Image (cartoon, coloured by chain):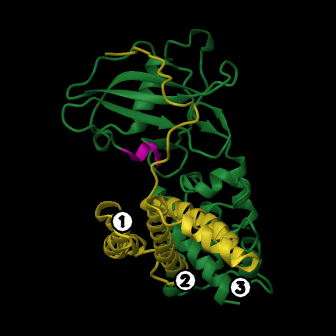
Chain colours: A green, B yellow
Amino acid sequence: MTAVAENPTTSASGSRGELPPAPEGSIAVTVKLHRFNPEVDSEPRWESFDIHALPTDRVLNLLHTIKWYVDGTLTFRRSCAHGVCGSDAMRINGVNRLACKVLVKDLLASKGKHTTITIEPIKGLPVNKDLLVNMDPFLDAFKAVKPFLITYGNEPTQERIQSAADRERFDDTTKCILCACCTTSCPVFWTEGTYFGPAAIVNAHRFIFDSRDEGAEERLDILNDVDGVWRCRTTFNCTDACPRGIQVTKAIQEVKRALLFRR
Amino acid sequence: MASSTTAASAVASGGKLYRGDLGMWSWVAHRITGVATFFFLFAHVLDTALVRVSPNIYDETIATYKNPLVNLMEIGLVGAVLYHALNGIRVMLVDFWSKGPKYQRVMLWATLAIWFAVMVPGAYFMILRTAKTLLGGGH
């Protein structure tokens, strides 16, 4: 998570002084941010920043430029900045993406037109400030599906052996980094916040189809609830949004089919 | 160059439309055609129930439907039911066929292709009598 504003009284300045000169080969772009400061604003508002960006910059670099040199009060999460930790999920030009994985060159307007990059917080979770949302409802749903190994009986004296084929069965859903891109892209989650959401189902899938795990029945029962997998309307927004390329809708479908045909 | 901070507030504060997958729009269309069809069925049950009350009033009611506007609505109804049925098959395949999620987009294009293939001649024949009445002054 990023640090909060160093000097809230002089909000117009960044924490690292004046903006450095534009690098060679850079392009003027407008970054349009959806901002909200609960201490000042009664409603969220749009704010635009005109900065210079290299085509090889990531969107996260633009946010850093704004925070460090233009407006130090800009608030957003980021940690590793390399698409591993999943902190900087945000809505970039209308779709959920990780800011550290989107390049400016992929957002440039067609020849001769000025580029505007729109950034909003992910949808469906309460906004604390600017691009920073409260992840608690998302993480509560994750915890509710028991995302840990459940076994009964005696502990084996060695490792729990698994064949390559059995490991392959749930390989796709092990890739989740809990960034919330999928859950906050889901129209059902926007209107029904009680829906477990794609991320929780993906993480349940990871254990339901693990040959070493014995808690599949418990998890299937949890997901058979009114707010479980049957809420899924197969819009495929989650599959499109996942920065790890997980076939999210397919995972949800496999849990649905396990509920219908496996028991 | 730098730091010209312009507070642009033209767009609604609730945020912009989510630029979702094609599947999201197919779902939106599915919901709209479903609700529209439901309201038709609601009216249809009521007008058909009239036949038990009085066959004459039923005939008179049905006669009021014979106008160009209702004819257009009928074509809309066929279009809505056809889309809802075809996309419904697609949604079922997405849920129950192991390769469904992989081919969801192909199936959507197939759905739309069949829809157009049926609707173009279908609408032509449905509108034929209205067109003849309006233009040719048939009886």
User: What whole-number distance in Å separates the C-alpha atoms at marks 3 and 1?
Assistant: 87 Å
Amino acid carrying mark 3 in the image: Thr
- Mark 2 residue type: Phe
Q: Which region of the structure is painted magenta?
A: A94-102
Q: Residue furthest top?
A: A10
Q: Nearer the viewer, mark 3 or mark 1?
A: 1
Mark 3 residue crowding within 10 angstroms, few (<14) / some (14–19) / many (20+): few
Image point 69% across, 67% down: which residue? A147
The answer to if A95 sits in the magenta stretch is yes
Q: Does label 1 lie on the same chain as label 2? A: yes
Q: Residue at x 57, y 9 (%)?
A: A10
Quick check: marks 3 and 1 in contact, CB under 8 Å? no
Residue with the mark numbered 1? B133
- Measure the alpha-carbon separation of dots 2 and 3: 40 Å
Q: Nearer the viewer, mark 2 or mark 3?
A: 2
Say which residue appears at 56% left-offset and 34% top-offset: A76
Chain under numbered label 3: A
Q: Is residue A244 visible?
A: no
In the picture provided, is B126 more to the left or to the right than A143? left
Contact (CB < 8 A) between labels 2 and 1? no
Give the residue at mark 2: B96
Q: Nearer the viewer, residue B22 or A202?
A: B22
Residue shown at the point (63%, 58%) measured from the top left: A188
- Given this view, does label 2 or label 1 mark the residue nearer the observer? 1
Give residue A13's mark. none
Identity, as a three-letter code, of the amino acid under mark 1? Thr
Q: Which mark is residue A157?
A: 3
Where residue B111 appears, as percent x and y from the top left, is 39, 74
Is B118 situated above or below B28?
A: below
Q: Earlier in the sequence, mark 2 or mark 1?
A: 2
Q: Nearer the viewer, residue B91 or A63?
A: B91
